[in-house]
Amino acid sequence: MKPDQITHVESVRLSDDGRAVRILDQSRLPNETVYLELSEPEALYEAIHSLRVRGAPAIGIFAGYAMYVLALRSQATNLPDFVEECRGYRDYLNASRPTAVNLRHMLDRMLAAAESLPCMDVDSVKDVMRQAALAIHREDIAMCRAISRYGLSLVKDGDGILTHCNAGPLATSRYGTALGPLFLAKEEGITLHAWCDETRPLLQGARLTAYELQQAGIDCTLICDNMASIVMKEGKINACFVGCDRVARNGDTANKIGTSGVAILARHYGIPFYVLGPSSSIDFSCPDGDHIPIELRDGEEIKSKFFLQPSSLPEVRCYNPAFDVTDHDLITAIVTERGICYPPFSESLAALFGRKSSD
Ligand code: MRU
């Protein structure tokens, strides 16, 4: 990949023959650049579950194409049978990762597209689903641009930004969400310095964020997760920018494990803490963080993944939650493609999306 191509990397798209989903396997980065073409239900499920495709918006785009590709396999000749098959695929893929609500939102949108034209023949409905999947992808590109612009308005030339995990081009379609302002700043000649973490459990900051920023020539420094406090204390951080996997309607936000710790530290040191994410990450049906399902992952990610030798004895018990919830009152603002929401979030989010705060 050429250095200037990182904001245009196609981490997810339809294959050239239009019958498979083509992804850049993020689990192999940064050392190997491997593209996969997937069309079997099990392979599509596995790609999400094993984080070959990850990042809430990228999972949403993937979900759109996956539903279309699976719809193409259907032999159903009448619409009710076809829709029933699509519903089965929706439920199957939805079980692959529970926390990022973009997956459910986009699967539902694809199913709604299949259900929307009861008088049409099955082939025409498949074409409508193709258009719906492409629209999800197009909207994501516009979303990244808008969030990047709003995010950039919150910082100034020379600022240090701490970002946790990866919410860049790989996790979306273009600039990313939390990393978007950094890419836009680079284009506009504004210098920001990124401090990247998430070096445990999955090293997404080290493997993906540092890689993306380095490729784009953006000044960045990798730190271990437990170093966030010292860089904040040393005055190196002016703002924290993080992504999100699900925002409850009161503003409580699930993001990669460790995010809430960064927010607590930011509060301690008086540093603004911003969540940047698309409207598809907001779950108005979810009242607060206690209702967000938290994915638990295999303990081997802690004990043996990324080590030459296992770090613990095989019988050691592990607890490996993939996400945590940052309390809404630790969040300075939530930046969406529609604008910036400030506390109280139950009111500002509802207003931005034209809902009553009690909805
Ligand atoms: O474990 P991951 O890599 O799936 O965690 C991803 C994150 O927490 C991201 O911040 C989130 O999905 C937003 S990506 C724009």
Image: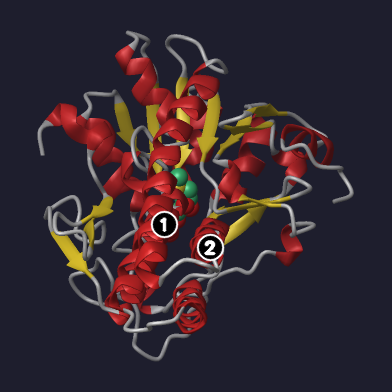
Asked if the residue at label 1 sits under 8 Å from ligand 1, the reply is no
CA gap, disc 2 and disc 1: 9 Å
In this picture, is 115 found above or below 267? below
Residue 166 visible (yes or no): no
Query: Going by the image, does 263 lie left or right of 15?
Result: right
- Name which of mark 2 and mark 1 comes first in the sequence: 2
Asked if the residue at label 2 sits under 8 Å from ligand 1, the reply is no
Could you tell me residue 159's position as x and y percent? 46, 16
Could you tell me residue 83's position as x and y percent? 50, 76
Q: Which residue is pictured at 24% across the width and 55% down the height?
A: 14
Between residue 151 and residue 268, name the one nearer to us: 151
Number of other residues with Cα within 10 Å of mark 2, as a class: few under 14, some 14 to 19, many 20 or more: some
Q: Secondary structure at mark 1?
A: helix
Number of other residues with Cα within 10 Å of mark 1, as a class: few under 14, some 14 to 19, many 20 or more: some
Between residue 188 and residue 310, name the one nearer to us: 188
- Residue receiving disc 1: 128
Between residue 113 and residue 268, name the one nearer to us: 113
Q: Secondary structure at mark 2?
A: loop
Query: Going by the image, does 220 lie left or right of 325?
Result: left
- Residue receiving disc 2: 117
Q: Which mark is residue 156?
A: none
- Asked if disc 2 and disc 1 are in contact, CB closer than 8 Å, the reply is yes
In this picture, is 54 found above or below 264? below
Query: Going by the image, does 285 lie left or right of 115?
Result: right
